[in-house]
Image: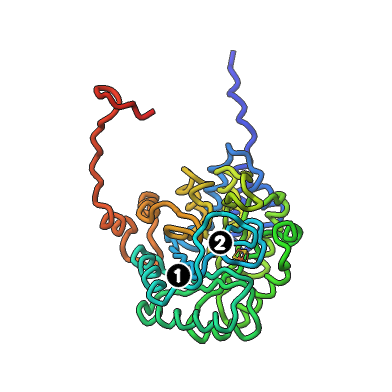
Amino acid sequence: MTTAAPTPAPTTAPTFDLLADRILAGGTATAEDALAVLRADDTELLHVVAAAGRLRRAHFGNTVKVNYLVNLKSGLCQENCNYCSQALGSTAPILKYSWLSADQTLKQAGAGLRGGASRVCLVASGRGPSDRDIDKVTELTRALKSEHPDVEVCACLGLLQDGQGERLREAGVDAYNHNINTAESHHDQIVQTHTYDDRVDTIGKAKSAGLSPCSGLIAGLGETDEQLVEALFALAALDADSIPVNFLMPFDGTPYENTWELSPTRCVKILAMARFVCPDKEIRIAGGREMHLRSLQALALQVANSIFLGDYLTSEGQDARADLQMLEDSGFVVLGSEEAPGREAEALDPARDPAIRRRGAGTEVPANA
Ligand code: SF4
């Protein structure tokens, strides 16, 4: 009597690989493909990552772009973006200050550049810049570029008025960030003091001024799967060069406090979906990386190709040395660096010897459990 081999569980693995084949051959993902990625069972996660990772490797090899945030002006905003700790009505106990000096800005940016960042993102809270604010940012950009000629500068100052993008570009600003944040069909649920069209208009102004458009989203704002897909296809249509994918950090004191909709595996699938929809764009793991991806951060880098080093605008990220170590451990190199990222990490943290156990068995100190 022969025994039948166990029937393998149904798998969609070939589907994701075929999707990658199609995209590598010049095709595009459909909304249905994107939804299938987002809704893949967790048992299929490695198949999703392997397929999306082929696209990542085809366009970006084993490089990771490292970006560094400098919050020029923190809090005190009159807009009411419900997710934002700096918004009107937020009681989140964040740092609040108005415009860093040039020295403070150069010092902060220098720290990020020493850590391997190739792009510095100069961010100021507020609805949009006044012409005086543009003066400040153009001066800061010139000072930064005279000290660090190779640095890429991205400005993120809110809604632009006519001519402001051109002034930034003339001063050497390379890119402008303005996130659409969510789907058009969900936008009015997350902010009421400006519209989705206002946001799209600013991205258009940045592009026509010759600035590289950077625009992304925040996942975990109560949007549906279809709305996440809608937002990603909108970003593809806007032809954003870099796409920061944020995962909501639900600050106490904001309308989204205690909102926890994400799991680490879902976050990886969201990033993979972004890769399938926008295969040759910079997909950046942005705010909420540590909080939501947790132990899957390194896995997520197999599909994303960009991170923020160190801290975020109003919250602390993991130690920058841990970021660099993670890149090295995963076999990645920092874009623009000849050195493996761990070289910087090693130089910063030579204490790599095993820590001798001084707790648990044989001691009076409670065990590590
Ligand atoms: S996201 Fe920007 S515009 Fe909206 S509240 Fe925060 S700082 Fe203000």
- x, y percentage for residue 97? 50, 67
Q: Is residue 65 visible?
A: yes
Q: Which residue is mark 2?
A: 244
- The residue tagged with tag 1: helix, strand or loop? strand
Residue 58 seen anywhere in this rendered image of the structure: no
- Give the mark toward the camera: 2 or 1: 1
Relative to residue 23, is residue 139 drawn left or right? left
Name the residue beneath numbered marker 1.
120
- Counting other residues with Cα less than 10 Å from the Cα at mark 1, is it few (<14), some (14-19), or many (20 or more)? many
Q: Position of residue 329 (x, y in %)?
A: 36, 49
Residue type at mark 2: give it: Pro
Question: Residue 115 in the image: x percent, y percent?
Answer: 35, 63
> Is the N terminus in the top left, top right, bottom left or bottom right quadrant?
top right
Look at the numbered disc 2 and say if its residue's Cβ is closer than 8 Å to ligand 1: no
- 261 to 157, vertically: above or below: above
Front residue of 151/74: it is 74
Q: Residue at x 57, y 46 (%)?
A: 48
Image region (quadrant) for ligand 1? bottom right
Rendered location of residue 235, percent (x, y)? 65, 65
